[in-house]
Amino acid sequence: MKKLISYIFLLFASQTIISQLYVSPNSYMYVADNYVYVNQDVNIQNTGNIYFRNESQFLQGTTGVSTNQGTGKLSVFQEGTENNYAYNYWCSPIGDLAGPGNGLFGVSMLNRPTDLTASAPATLIPTLDGLATDTSLSIASRWVFNFLSKNSYSGWVQVGSASTIQAGVGFTMKGIGGSDNTTVLDGRLLSGLPSGTGIQNNPGSKQRYDFRGKPNDGNINITVGAGGLLTLTGNPYPSAINLNMFLHENSVGTGVISGAAYFWEHDPSVNSHVLVAYRGGYGVYIANGLDPILDVGTYSAATWVYYNGDGTINLSPPSANTTGGTYTRMFSPIGQGFMIDGSTLGGTAVMKNSYRVFRKEGVANNSQFHRGSKPSDFWDEIPNVAGIDYSKHSKKGLPQIKIHSIVNNDFVKQMVLAFNPNATDGYDIGKDAKSADKNLASDTYFPLDNKNEYVISTLPFDVEKRIPFAVKCKARTSFKFMVGSLLNFDLTDEIYVYDKVTGLYHDIKNGYYEVTLDSGSEDRFEITFKNASLSTEDLSNIKSCMVFQDNDSELLTIDNPKLLDLKTCSIYDISGKLIFNTKQLGSNNRYAFTSSSFSDGVYVVKLNTKDNLVITKKIIISKK
């Protein structure tokens, strides 16, 4: 049955499920804080409109290609997260109005909101910087590119102002400078309810765009080149998607892609259009859970590096001693773009309506565009096209160890070990992810096969396991290894790097291991969960010694219940600089030292006993 819309407001409490949706001329539907689910097609007639506001979303249940039609428009807001010097990766939720089915898109179809339902077209300019004011929005179209089945910088193709972007094809666009203080309220006044807080169009580096056109729908084909070629795609619908479903079905299911999604992150402190000044990289997400559809997957943060003028990685960069942000990527919001890479076969990946969900953005919702209360272990109710009852499923991810390697104090590489009994120790499609930084001169990686360098390795846990951990360097290089964080990991208390050349184990859970290597590739390291050189008594003595930091009293306390004879106590900052040292502590049961002179940060406390045991513990000092 068709639903004829004249004027209708859907606000907050109720959702609407419709067989077919027909919006007549000069009519509109307004949706706030809600979603609409249409089982079949949508026909928005000339001068008809559908407005989705306050993160409202539009779900459709068709199972084939889109038959949406009409010359009216759907309008949905989305915000970028970068300034005029940095790229967002996008994928449009709408297309043009020419004929039935999904249309083509161009940035000329973007608009600047002026109130709840009205918008003004953005102006496209040929200069370097887009600009927002209280009365206008200009977009520098020279920064609009796509990247389709390529593997080098020369694969970027400029789209500019052309409306030639097919549904499912991602594109880059730099953010907007200036600010726009125009505030669009959330629409509650229309229903007589108190108005919520409005959001400025652009408070600075967060430009709001109004995407207006025919809503994308149905199966959308994405051509992916074989052998690791990359394609920029993204979420092509006016709703969020369960990214796990797309990655899993097109990797484990059809074998077209590797199963990883790559998200560009840009250092916001770099304000330049010159390529050699860029600093950024790709974070990597994989859907590798016990239930690969419903469990949160694994994300490895981007390595921020510099680039040469030809787009290759600068092998001798100035210091960029940091990584990108930590995001949970399971649900991709409206407009989010990302890279996918082809398997050995490649082919056609398919985006489907069945992946669509109603999920608002935010950390608690696990839906974040490259930007609550204590969460439950189970999902709340998530409206979705596939008919899944999310509330019956745990959202707790796999046990994970995030290992940080600081390379020459130039950059930080984050690698992740994730533990899944359904995985193998070798490469598994859809469970392991290749590094996006394979051309770095000095790097660390998991050598799962003889061809690729992996940044995420999913494998079954065994406390006796010894996990190969490789490094490479083209010149003499220092490496510092440490555990950056643990997620859901309580499988063992000990994590070591074992150096096969020296025969020594180094505790990287409570401290770090630093080594300088000459040029070449090294397979001399392993991650282990036992120190085979320690006796049971040694392990007991090490575990008995506890270190506490009381930030309120600015006091560091060492408890020594077994009265170990301590030779030295040394405290290092995270860069390895010695901050504090004292000798011949003796065998007291407790020691206390002031930490009032220490800056905020992470420190490593290293204790040496007269029996040559080494005890390391991490502390965090915060005076806020």
Image: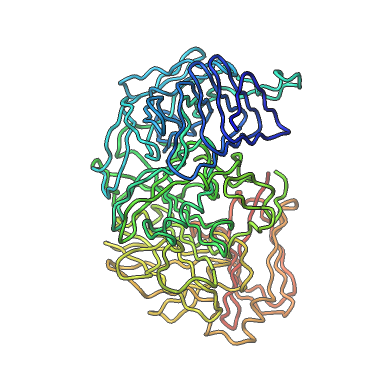
- Image coordinates of residue 300 in percent, x first then y, are 48, 55
Q: Nearer the viewer, residue 579 or 440?
A: 440
Q: Nearer the viewer, residue 506 or 366?
A: 366
- Image coordinates of residue 553 in percent, x first then y, are 75, 53
At horizontal 55% and vertical 14% (from top left) the residue drawn is: 26
Give the image quarter of residue 7: top right
- Image coordinates of residue 263 in percent, x first then y, are 43, 46
- Image coordinates of residue 54 in percent, x first then y, are 62, 29
Left or right of 189? Residue 133 is: left
Q: Is residue 565 above or below residue 417?
A: below
At horizontal 31% and vertical 26% (from top left) the residue drawn is: 162
Give the quadrant of the N terminus.
Answer: top right
Left or right of 515? Residue 226 is: left
Q: Is residue 596 above or below residue 139?
A: below
Q: Residue furthest front?
A: 1
Give the image quarter of residue 593: bottom right
Give the image quarter of residue 128: top left
Query: How many numbered marks are there?
Result: 0
Q: Nearer the viewer, residue 172 or 164?
A: 164
